[in-house]
Amino acid sequence: ELNSTPGIASVGFSQEHAGAVAARHLLSRGRKRLAYVAAQLDPRVLQRGDGFRQALQAAGCFDPALQLMAPMPSSIGLGGELFNDLLRRHPDVDGIFFCNDDLAQGAILEASRQGLKIPEQVAMVGFNDLPASAHLVPRLTSIRTPRAAIGRQAAQLLLGLLDGKPAAQPTQDLGFELVVRES
């Protein structure tokens, strides 16, 4: 998580920007009724949702009823449950950004059980680009994050600070990548 507070060193990427990129991608595919489905509501998950909401507000299509926030841990099973709950209450949803790939994976599996066509009926974007996401049917579009690189850079930064070396670049934004697949 990036922190621009003076005197605070951080390594990561903008969660808000990642959420906005997911929203813009779905909008660019002609989707209008967009939902954010989140679990394990830590600050990063909430920041992703903020970026998604802000991009939808800028496009004039934000609906607060389409934010489904569950405090329990993220899982494939929960993804299927939340997907069912969302579609039961809002059958006109045509695009969903999931805060984690495991939720999106569960939604794709549940959609398959129900005979729903992804992305024709509902387009989906996940987050973190977990390995299984490239092998689902359809393959999941996801935001790939540099988790290993963040860990390495943060460890190097911390070791330098412990040795009394000030951080040459206290805020290190390693970015992210939207990996567009079939969903």
Image (spheres, helix red, strand yellow):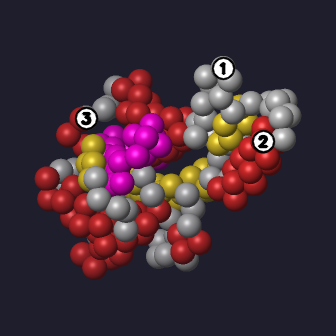
Q: Residue at x 18, y 50 (%)?
A: 90
Does any portion of residue 72 appear in the rendered image? yes
Categorize mark 2 by other alpha carbons within 10 Å: few (<14), some (14-19), many (20+).
Answer: few
Tell me the amino acid under the disc marked 1. Answer: Pro
Closer-to-camera residue (13/43): 43
Relative to 78, say whether 49 is above or below: above
Q: Report the label total.
A: 3
Is label 1 or label 3 in front? Answer: 1
Percent from the top left, x then y, of residue 50? 41, 33
Residue type at mark 2 is: Leu
The image shows residue 34 at horizontal and vertical percentages of 33, 44
Amino acid at circle 3? Asp
Q: Earlier in the sequence, mark 1 or mark 3?
A: 1
User: Which of marks 2 and 1 precedes in the sequence?
Assistant: 1
Residue on which disc 1 sits? 6
Residue at image mark 3: 63
Res 179 quadrant in image: bottom right
Residue range of the region highlighted in magenta in the rendering: 27-48
What residue sits right under mark 2 in the picture?
A: 162
Q: Nearer the viewer, residue 34 or 32?
A: 34
Identity of the residue drawn at 79% across and 47% down: 159
Q: CA distance from mark 1 to mark 2?
A: 18 Å
Lower sequence index among marks 2 and 3: 3
Above or below, 18 against 150 in this view is above
Q: Is residue 88 left or right of residue 176?
A: left
Quadrant of residue 75 within the rendered picture:
bottom left
Percent position of residue 10, x then y: 66, 37
